[in-house]
Amino acid sequence: MLEHGGRLRAAARRYGIPLSDWLDLSTGVNPEGWTVPAVPPEVWVRLPEEDDGLETAASAYYGCDSIFPVAGSQAAIQALPALLHAQRVGVIHPGYAEHAHAWRRAGYKVDGVAPETIARGPGSMPWDVLVAINPNNPTGHRFAPEVLLAWQERLAARGGCLVVDEAYMDPTPEFSLAAYCPRPGLIVLRSLGKFFGLAGIRVGFVLAEPELLERLAALLGPWTVTGPSRWVAREALADSPWQEAVRQRLPENARQLTDLLTAAGLKPAGGCALFQWCPGVKAARRQEALARQGILTRRFADPPGLRLGLPGSVSASERLATALLAK
């Protein structure tokens, strides 16, 4: 299995620091996420039902009626290679490594595609499927909708497909391609894990043409999302006041983190509302030094760099600042 952020228990064992004493900046999950109310008792004892209002709430939130819930966008990432036919696949690099891993595991030839190549728009291209992440993880590079739609049109014209992972898009919905779905050759993946701070409920959505969603449902089988998770997701998606308040707050939180890192000599070269990307910076040494002080970050090897999520409070920011300046 590929390495990911989180895994606090493993870090606690390795460094001998109690689990409760860690500051986890490794995931890019909103540290001030949506507060989950008490789940009604009957939700725990009934099988999940498709007419419980989740799809309706998701359609209203994303502005798309052709939508299918999955157990986090990771479930869709693993399933798509079995549903799409391609000779050659382009996957953004650097990017969330599970995309390329899933296609290679299914036997496809995968080319890494630089964000700059995607940003220039489609020229002559060898790919039948192109996978983009917008905003990109870990660099934060964000593509204009018209650029990605140009790729979608070119790929669809040759029977291909553009897959766009929008796991970090919620703070900036005006850049999303969700409202353009369904259309031929376009698949959009969304998740409640990051913006809503609900990584533990494992809920995501696939937005695509109905025929593809039908095949995805048949492949995954019944009850792809648990009943309690469906209930929580529905309530969170319907909470518009909370969503708007968070969209107002996150840019300032991101600016504060940028200033903090810059003052410590880690000037970010990319990022988004939920994380900052610091390339180079002797990433392995920095990650180790912070871990020894109970601060978990996400290190990438290719290209080398650190991704740091939002601290979430004044005290957490002060702790990070002190740790970065420690010798």
Image: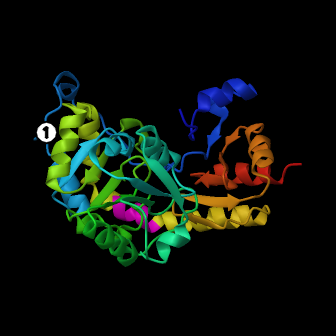
x and y, in percent, of residue 112 in the image: 54, 57
Q: Of 255 and 168, which appears nearest the observer? A: 168
Q: Main secondary structure of the magenta part?
A: helix
In the displayed structure, does residue 220 sit left or right of residue 323? left
Placement of 167 over or under 174, stated as above or below: above
In the displayed structure, does residue 96 sit left or right of residue 302? left
Placement of 5 over or under 13, stated as above or below: below
Q: Residue at x 27, y 51 (%)?
A: 206
x and y, in percent, of residue 283 in the image: 75, 51
The boundaries of the magenta stretch are 243-248
Residue under pointer 1: 50
In the displayed structure, does residue 281 sit left or right of residue 128? right
In the displayed structure, does residue 38 sit left or right of residue 41? right
Q: Residue at x 69, y 67 (%)?
A: 259
Residue at the limit of the structure toward the left, as seen here: 51
Which of the 4 image quarters holds residue 23? top right
Magenta-colored stretch includes residue 184: no
Which of the 4 image quarters holds residue 291? top right
Placement of 214 over or under 241, stated as above or below: above
Amino acid type, label 1: Glu
Can see residue 167? no
Placement of 307 over or under 36, stated as above or below: below
SS type, badge 1 = loop
Q: Residues within 10 Å of mark 1 (few under 14, many from 20)?
A: some
x and y, in percent, of residue 179 in the image: 24, 67
Which of the 4 image quarters holds residue 159? bottom left
Can see residue 44? yes
Q: How many marks?
A: 1
